[in-house]
Amino acid sequence: MARTTHTVTNQPPPLLGYDVYSADRALVAAVERHLDPAVREEARAELSALGRTSGSAQAQEWGVLANENPPRLRTHDRYGGRIDEVEYHPSWHRLLGKGVSAGLTSAWARPGGHVRRAAAFVVWTQVEAGNGCPLSMTHAAVPALRADPDLAAEWEPRLTSTVYDRELRPAHLKAGALFGMGMTEKQGGSDVRANTTAARPLAEDGAYELTGHKWFCSAPMSDGFLVLARAPEGLTCFLVPRVLPDGSRNTFLLQRLKDKLGNRSNASGEVEFDGTWARRVGAEGRGVRTIIGMVAATRLDCVLGSAGLMRQAVAQAVHHCSYREAFGGKLADKPLMRNVLADLALESEAATTLALRLAAAYDSGTAQDRALLRLAVPAAKFWVTKRCAPVAVEAAECLGGNGYVEESGLPRLVRESPLNSVWEGAGNIQALDVLRALRREPEALDACLREIGLARGADHRLDAAIKDLLTGLADLEGAEARARRLVERLALVLQGALLVRCAPPEVADAFCASRLGGDWGASFGTLPHTLDLAALVERARPVT
């Protein structure tokens, strides 16, 4: 009889079988704050249902399998015919189908739709972030398509549907459709005005033939794509259907799939257009202005996605340390580890609070909130997405060696964490966009300062930070070289103002002391020891 060489002890149980939404106190508070009371109960029920699915062993297994079995490109069929299809593991389709049915593409047509969708996006990201790409692109295509009322009337019901139909067939035969996007090219990258893809008008009104390439095509198995190409009057936005109305495949030549650091479950491809049929969206020469509504919505999704990744990383770290014992007690009760966990929790809550406020601005639709979005979205995209990677890495370290092992799930979060700062315009693009808004759209700055001003006088450290920000904004000469510092400060002051107004006192106090008051080191775990760190950790603990 074999001897037992050891007994497994002092290991935390898996973080499974819990409601991801209801266990996130900051997210729940934000949803309750921003939703009309008439829809709160309905939203609470739907988000809690998605939260339970997200925390289930089955859904978490889908995420693991989708990453372990990444998509494969099939350019030709067995007879040599060109098909340009991407094969996914069944778990990918289960994830994407659940995301669609949960309303992650249907924010535009229901009360409080953006706040409800934003919260769901944060929750579902914690299962697997890759399927967020087609969900985000489909959601964000709606404002761009509205530049052409006829196209919007045709496509919007399909894009906002809660039916996932994976088959490649004419869109008019489908109950639901997904959209992708192709903007960047090899020679230009983020400088889309350097695009060379050519659009030649056809006899049919609004129809064109495209010739060129796209270096990054998001969600290449979608039913349609918004792309930029150069028409006779300049850079123009086009809708490229994957399948034409007669059932034939549009010319959409997938050259290869990107081999990415993370986001392994999701396909990103390089595509060639060679006589590809397209329909113009908006006026010729107004492509950037037409597609900018899509870009703004996807940038907010980058903020939401990063908030979701941070929340899951922090939840895993706090959960582990609440069970793991070392040096005579629970790790979470050790003063230094408590400081680290509290600091991580603070970063996560600040990200969630800002992201949900921006989603609420979409719902309100007031002129002031539209102006707020113009400045606050790129500022939040710049800052929140950059905070994701250090949070994920530090959270993995909280698990020690276990956090470096794939089975813990933390390595997948670490690999995913830089993505949202790169996609939809990297840091410099966001910083320059903020400067552009400051110089050309004074109403955007006014809206931001009004939002910040609602908290003025409540905390002396916030007041000092506001004064410092105003000094930096007073002179924009030579601002490009210091744009990152300026945008970082704007984002931090926005977060601080929101927390002072909305968060528990211990959260606001800790944020103002560290992020605004300067009593903070260069690494996590350097909060002032006089703060109520235990309350911060307890607030972040996922109750299973």
Image: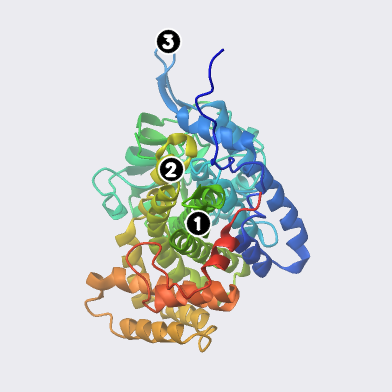
Q: Please provide percent x and percent y for residue 245.
A: 56, 32
CA distance separating discs 1 and 2: 20 Å
Residue 202 shows in the view: no
Residue 214 versus residue 139 in the image, above or below:
above
Mark 2 belongs to which amino acid? Gly
Question: 72 above or below 299?
Answer: above
- Using the image, tell me which numbered label, if any, was put on residue 403: 2
The numbered disc on residue 307 is 1
Observer-nearest of 481 and 82: 481
Whole-angstrom CA distance, mark 3 to mark 1, is 47 Å
Numbered disc 2: secondary structure: helix
Residue matched to label 3: 79
Q: Nearer the viewer, mark 2 or mark 3?
A: 2
**5 up-or-down from 45: above or below:** above
Amino acid type assigned to the residue bearing label 1 in the image: Ala
Residue sitting at x 65%, y 68%: 34
Residue 272 percent coordinates (x, y): 34, 34
Q: Residue 175 lies in what quarter of the image? A: top right
Mark 3 against mark 1, which lies toward the viewer?
1
Q: Are marks 2 and 3 in contact (CB under 8 Å)?
A: no
Residue 438 placement, left or right of 152: left
- Left or right, 93 with respect to 521, comes to right
